[in-house]
Image (cartoon, coloured by chain):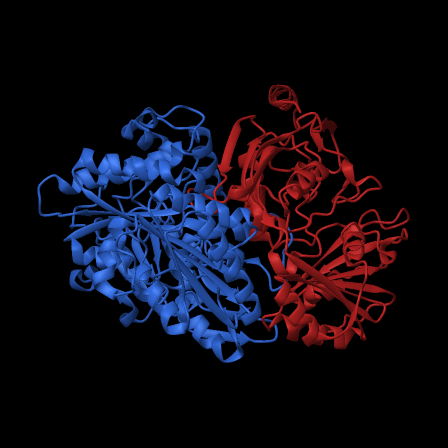
Chain colours: A red, B blue
Amino acid sequence: MGDLTRDFTDRIAAASGAKPLRIRGGGSKDFYGEMPRGEILDTRGHSGIVAYEPTELVITARCGTPLAEIETALAAHGQFLPFEPPAFGEATSLATVGGAVAAGLSGPRRASVGALRDFVLGVNILDGVPRRLTFGGTVMKNVAGYDVSRLIAGSMGTLGLILEVSLKVLPRPVAEATLRFELPQDKALDVLNAWAGQPLPISASCWHDDALTVRLSGANAAVAAAQRKLGGEPVADGDAFWQELREQRHPFFTDRETLWRLSVPSITRALDLPGEQLIEWGGSQRWWRGGANVREAAARAGGHAVLFRQSEHGDKSARVFAPLPDAVMAIHRRLKATFDPRGVFNPGRLYPDL
Amino acid sequence: MVSRAHDPELEQDFSDVDRDALVAELARLVPAANLLCETEDLKPYECDGLAAYRQVPLAVVLAENEAQVVAVLQTCHRLGVPVVARGAGTGLSGGALPHGNGVLLSLAKMKRILKIDPVARVAVVEPGVRNLAISEAAAPHGLYYAPDPSSQIACTIGGNIAENAGGVHCLKYGLTVHNVLRVRAVTMAGDVIELGSHALDAPGYDLLAVAIGSEGLLAVVTEVTVKLVPRPETARVVMASFADVARAGDAVAAVIAAGIIPAGLEMMDKPAIAAVEPFVNAGYDLDAAAILLCESDGTPEEVDEEIARMRAVLEASGATGVRVSRDEAERTRFWAGRKAAFPAAGRLSPDYYCMDGTIPRKRLGDILRAIADMEREFGLRCMNVFHAGDGNLHPLILYDATVPGETERTEEFGARILEMSVALGGTITGEHGVGHEKLRGMCVQFAADELTAFHGVKAAFDPQGLLNPGKAVPSLHRCAEFGRMHVHRGELKFPDIERF
């Protein structure tokens, strides 16, 4: 537990476009995004839960607070981070909440409860001037000013240094059950879309290797009723399965090949790609291991592709994130200039010229 | 509120706009029937749902398609003319108040539902489609659009996006920002941009989240994709009476602490109960200091289980009476009173003024006590309805605009409630927006550096500052004029806090 706001302010003031900063927490997501550049600004010393009010459904923590510490505090009151942010890395205790918000990644429950950005209520940041700025707050509904908190979520540290973040939390579901079905990909996509249109308490899904696994979450009666309706084969250790999936320790992810994440409409038919795929989020998130560029395929389906992990031998010139139309990129550049006018934060981590 | 001239002293000066040249250019872009220039035609557009502020624009364009929106914006951009977009005009903060030297761009004619896809569970609609019309169109598929602001019968999805509209079910189902997948919009320069996608995310910064709730200052929406969700099989509501409001507030916290997220969780205080009961005969407990309405939805088994848990928590929290709706008719009746709060206020008093502060739930007792003190101080009555689940308070100040000075006292009363909301760790607006009305509150809630950053966000989309200028984010100059000190979310002691 410590407050390094003053040190951070000095570091930012001393940085420049020629001597930029690379914001880093536990380093669990060093692999993600374009190549990090700059002198490391380690956030881990700025740590601690600032406020947690279970009955307000809000937790506020400093950027360097380990995700694991937050999850432990929430679990003591039967609550959790519903978007299930992945921690990654061998020791999951490394990942920090600041890094999780900056990366903006969500886990298996995303399709049913919403993404990380949906749970960000407020942020306190140091911008590139540096100025200390607060946006949003700790209340559920707040439309005063633009929603800068959600702009910061997923911005890969290019707009500012998150000092503190307030997240909405939820009670853990009373009951959960995991079911497994033997189904080829097209059939699995059909049933996932059909089930999503019915009032069923499905909270996660994973299709891989001709097997569909779904998780049910909710009231005891709701989970039991859905289980009777859907059938399938109950999976004994469901929690472990979803935890492995969330942390990408599922066997699909273990090898060192290039990994693409295709974010597409859930109804997109089976993508004609060589090799293995793993499908989450009711069909909306598809992982593919392979070196070819699948950006075109994702765009044709109405989505986009992220070069999530590049293998050692992969094409280093390939961009991580899909290119943006000129008018949208121009808005990005002007936002960057507003929050980081001297270009000191994570240059090139999101797009080469941001 | 009564009609009063809109304060023309906006930050930017557009007094040199040449009306005749503008009208001549617009006439080349849209059919004659879609361009209004005569005073009697402009009059209906002089205000939105907050009728206290009125201003007739130079012209009204009734756009029928995206090409017309692009053409009008490009032309106004070239001529340096301000543009204010408008949907149904139901907003309560003056966000669609026209600019006296500008064009009022109505999207109300763009009301086609382009696609309902029951398999993908999305609706693609034009901005002028009414909120409720989406749910009606999706109903045959057992789906609906979740956010349900109380004006949903009239308000448009474009306006919902501008305000990030909520409703009584947003604790469980989220706000507009949680239920919109994609927006197609036109920038002031005339560029068509798409924010979000039909997938669950999009590359780059989350500009969709920034556009939602931006009060028409960043771009003009021309097409929207919303998420549709399965309609719950059934819903029941528990109505609980309390002998004092603090106990009712504690009961709200106890429900959440028990791990329950109700589909709706609303509170009404005694003056509100007294106002609505004769109006709707909902069967409310007239002796109660406050009542809570706590709703559960889902499968019948799920609802039975949750209602039993809710009931136990409410009883343990000191409810003096608990009733559970036995059927749909009774559930509708229990809700009817809550929904009739505004019309009831209108029946009780010649005028009323609705506020929209949000506070941490645990400060409910504090703010209600402060409001009671202010009622005495200002000599005005106030009834309170409250989205208790999300801490969003709607005090309705009752007044008579024909009594000299009462309008001004009402405004001061309202501003003080909002300042108190900020001092208690909340915000000046939960769902109605800042618009023209709450500029002063913005000076209280945000520091100069934060307001400067907001102006930077605005300039990133609209460098010339022509879209809805003067709204939502006050200039620093204006804050200085208000003479209001920034109160930093309870960190600085607000003088009024001493009164508790």
Looking at the picture, tell me which residue is in the foreground, B433 or B68.
B433
Q: Position of residue A283 (x, y in %)?
A: 70, 67
- Is residue B174 shown to the viewer in this render? no
Image height check: is B396 above or below A344? below
Residue name at image x 20 percent, y 64 percent: B41
Looking at the picture, tell me which residue is in the foreground, A295 or A311.
A311
Q: Quadrant of the C terminus of chain B?
A: top left
State how many labels appear. Answer: 0
Q: Position of residue B4 (x, y in %)?
A: 16, 47
Image height check: is A132 above or below B257? above
Query: In the shown orientation, is residue B409 left or right of residue A86?
Result: left
Image height check: is B266 above or below B67? above
Looking at the picture, tell me which residue is in the foreground, B244 or A186.
B244
Q: Position of residue B69 (x, y in %)?
A: 41, 62
Q: Position of residue A114 (x, y in %)?
A: 60, 55
Quadrant for residue A168, please give it.
top right
Query: In the shown orientation, is residue A329 left or right of residue A242?
Result: left
Query: In the shown orientation, is residue B449 left or right of residue A182?
Result: left
- Is residue A271 shown to the viewer in this render? yes
Residue name at image x 64 percent, y 38 percent: A158
Residue name at image x 29 percent, y 40 percent: B13
